[in-house]
Image (spheres, coloured by chain):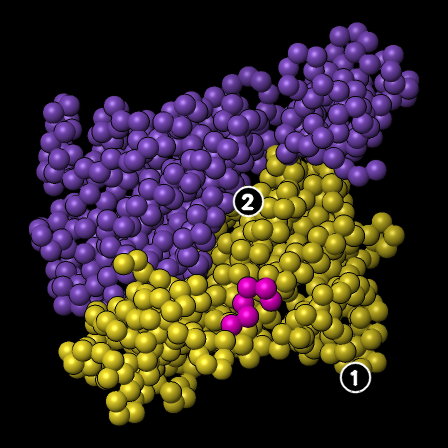
Chain colours: A purple, B yellow
């Protein structure tokens, strides 16, 4: 008999099936037991009736504890009132009786849960988050493939830093001196567009930042996309389409997961309209009118991002930032050389910045001048400057933070739950 | 007028189109010029006739150098004899005139090419390899999604080593002491199957090995898959399906790329039959009969792998290896406790091992005993042992090396060309 998965139970109504999984929860009332059974694909109820099973099976069933692994047989029935399917147990093989499970129904502190992350992942909320994460990842690939982007894996071990050197993890690299863990693959995929036209990377990035906020991890996943012959305005359209595709996919494929997470689905649905675009300067003015004490030349704080989208159903692009607070590789606006042709996308409901994007400086002289002003080691970046010497083209790109996007989709403020094994400044285990 | 891509030229026969890209090559004969034009999606010929274009355009066209970036307009025509499409130029905008391009038609040494990897990527062979790599990546996701595996990203920064500690890159991790760059995500995704049933990771892994062979990189990409309630034999079926899916996708989607690479497609097609399975002991006997001096207890060398598949159209599983030469987490064979329920998959045509897989030890006591025998730091692995205490299940998994698989598909022996920016012991730039 072949294994059936809980998610497919509906297709087997009134039939005998074989399932393999774990007992998530159990209760008993005299001659009947109810098990919450999970197999990774979903959860269902199993009913064990003393009157319906052999005495031996009834005895075995008494031994089952929370998190025990079992193989069961039984008939699929439908809940008389609800759209729920359950199994009336007829056969049982215990695979292993679990020891007393350390994660119970009582509240545990975050430190205990993080130390037991390998077990905590089994909890319904954590299960749901990882499933949503998977859908976000697939939606990313699907959207980019459809738009003609191919995957180009940027290196993790790099000889220099993309944005400053203060927050880098260092590695001894044979007799080549120090190497650093990449904070962004952007510069590398910029090189690759001259071969493949449009490409993206999607991998881990690292920041040795001593920040202890709920928005910081030392290791997190980023998708960076880059396209030749695409300018700032078109890039924002691509970015908007990318986020929209993710939201639609999550809504279409994660109904159960969003229910478990108690996510306000309507709020996600309302994002499905044209995104707003505001200049940086208009944004500062707006924030100050709402009581923020932010000044021109400052980056948006978490509070500012919350104020900005408090009355907006859709994400907001903040574009054309002053050069001083953005990275050297961005293209200066020909209409206003004090600002870059760049944008940050701020998510709804206070979930903060999820995309940073810009057109890149394609003029060799302007780029070199900018790098000198920022005192970058020019020799290390010679290869990057080369891209402006041999067939330079207007091009743009953007980066999406996976964990922040998953947090937004799931309605989770603490980014540490959005990655399977979070790494923070005081956490490297398990 | 909207940009058209070269790959879609056929759909625009006899129509005026706009294209954006680079001049890969050019030749001229009096009143006519022929450009090889590439835009990342493919390559085509552009014909510039002095009689057909304005004088100004003809003058501009004289300025164009190899690797210059241009926007062109023209009518799509079909080659009279071949299934090839070209464009008769009618409009031209030069984006940038390239400086003299350093990579010419003459032979360059590998060091020169690797130092100029950011430019070398534009060469047809390198373009083709990266396109095949992208198809292999997508085929991996597609196969695993269809088989119910979801993505679980294993951490890169880890407190301990999966297989030995001699070849690890070290990082100072705040006040937590040393962290190490992961050599495999397997142990972590083993934890995750207890939540999601089936999962995989797919990311960079690191080996600080001082090997200078054509098969070694210090940074390379691995896909690790893991499934609950799957035993050794079923796992081999899944592995076979995975490789088959990749080969079929590459054959279906990379015809032009394989032509550029001069790959023997027939050899790839012939793999589409049931893979062979041999025990380790039979393999050693076979190799010795063919003249190898390998002894029982030794790992297969590159030459052995070549001999093994020399007369085989299909890849060969070598299964049930002696414990001494395989990793501690593998399940001992109940029928022969001296060997593990594991297998390596050896590719055809001497491309070597592309998969390592095994059933995992699910018995707490046997695993602990094995770990003690190998003198592993038990405390660091407590979380891993926990998986055998709380609902242990039979489970199996496997890892596919991306670069080796891409090398096999492309017919490339030197693995350094299969990754966009290779990292070797003497190479960290660009």
Q: Residue at x 15, y 78 (%)?
A: B56
The quadrant where residue B297 appears: bottom right
The secondary element bearing badge 1 is classed as: loop
- The extreme top residue here reads A30
For the N terminus of chain B, the quadrant is bottom left
The quadrant where residue A394 appears: bottom left
What residue sits right under mark 1 in the picture?
B291
The quadrant where residue B276 appears: bottom right
Mark 1 belongs to which subunit? B
Q: Residues within 10 Å of mark 2 (few under 14, many from 20)?
A: many
Q: Is residue B268 left or right of residue B75?
A: right
Q: Report the disc number at residue A396.
A: none
Q: Which residues are magenta?
A: B251-256
Question: Can residue A293 be spotted in the picture?
Answer: no
* Residue B312 vertical position relative to residue A317 in the rendered view, above or below: below
For the C terminus of chain B, the quadrant is bottom left
Q: Main secondary structure of the magenta part?
A: helix
Task: For the residues labelled 2 and 1, say whether their Cβ atoms are less than 8 Å apart.
Answer: no
- Residue A5's spot in the image, x, y percent? 70, 34
């Amino acid at each position: 008999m072949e294994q059936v998965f809980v998610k497919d139970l509906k297709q087997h109504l009134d039939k005998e099936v074989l399932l393999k999984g774990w007992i998530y929860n159990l209760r008993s009332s005299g001659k009947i037991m109810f098990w919450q059974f999970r197999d990774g694909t979903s959860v269902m109820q199993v009913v064990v009736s003393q009157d319906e099973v052999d005495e031996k099976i009834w005895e075995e069933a008494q031994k089952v504890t929370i998190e025990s692994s079992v193989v069961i047989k039984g008939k699929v029935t439908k809940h008389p009132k609800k759209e729920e399917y359950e199994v009336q147990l007829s056969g049982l093989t215990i695979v292993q009786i679990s020891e007393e499970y350390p994660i119970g129904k009582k509240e545990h502190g975050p430190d205990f849960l993080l130390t037991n992350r390998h077990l905590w992942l089994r909890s319904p909320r954590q299960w749901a988050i990882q499933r949503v994460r998977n859908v976000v990842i697939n939606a990313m690939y699907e959207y980019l493939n459809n738009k003609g982007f191919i995957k180009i894996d940027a290196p993790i071990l790099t000889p220099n830093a993309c944005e400053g050197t203060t927050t880098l993890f260092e590695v001894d690299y044979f007799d080549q001196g120090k190497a650093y863990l990449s904070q962004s693959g952007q510069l590398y995929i910029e090189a690759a567009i001259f071969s493949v036209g449009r490409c993206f990377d999607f991998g881990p990035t690292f920041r040795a930042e001593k920040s202890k906020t709920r928005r910081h991890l030392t290791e997190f996943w980023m998708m960076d996309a880059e396209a030749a012959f695409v300018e700032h305005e078109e890039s924002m359209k691509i970015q908007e389409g990318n986020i929209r595709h993710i939201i639609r996919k999550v809504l279409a494929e994660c109904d159960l997961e969003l229910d478990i997470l108690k996510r306000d689905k309507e709020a996600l649905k309302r994002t499905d309209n044209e995104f707003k675009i505001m200049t940086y300067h208009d944004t500062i003015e707006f924030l100050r009118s709402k009581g923020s004490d932010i000044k021109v030349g400052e980056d948006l704080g978490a509070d500012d991002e919350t104020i900005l989208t408090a009355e907006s159903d859709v994400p907001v692009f903040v574009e054309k930032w002053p050069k001083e607070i953005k990275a050297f590789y961005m293209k200066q606006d020909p209409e206003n050389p004090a600002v870059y042709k760049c944008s940050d996308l701020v998510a709804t409901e206070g979930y903060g910045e999820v995309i940073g994007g810009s057109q890149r400086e394609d003029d060799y002289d302007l780029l070199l001048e900018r790098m000198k002003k920022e005192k970058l080691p020019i020799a290390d970046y010679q290869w990057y400057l080369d891209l402006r010497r041999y067939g330079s083209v207007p091009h743009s790109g953007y980066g999406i933070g996976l964990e922040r996007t998953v947090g937004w989709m799931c309605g989770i403020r603490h980014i540490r739950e959005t990655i399977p094994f979070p790494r923070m400044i005081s956490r490297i285990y398990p």
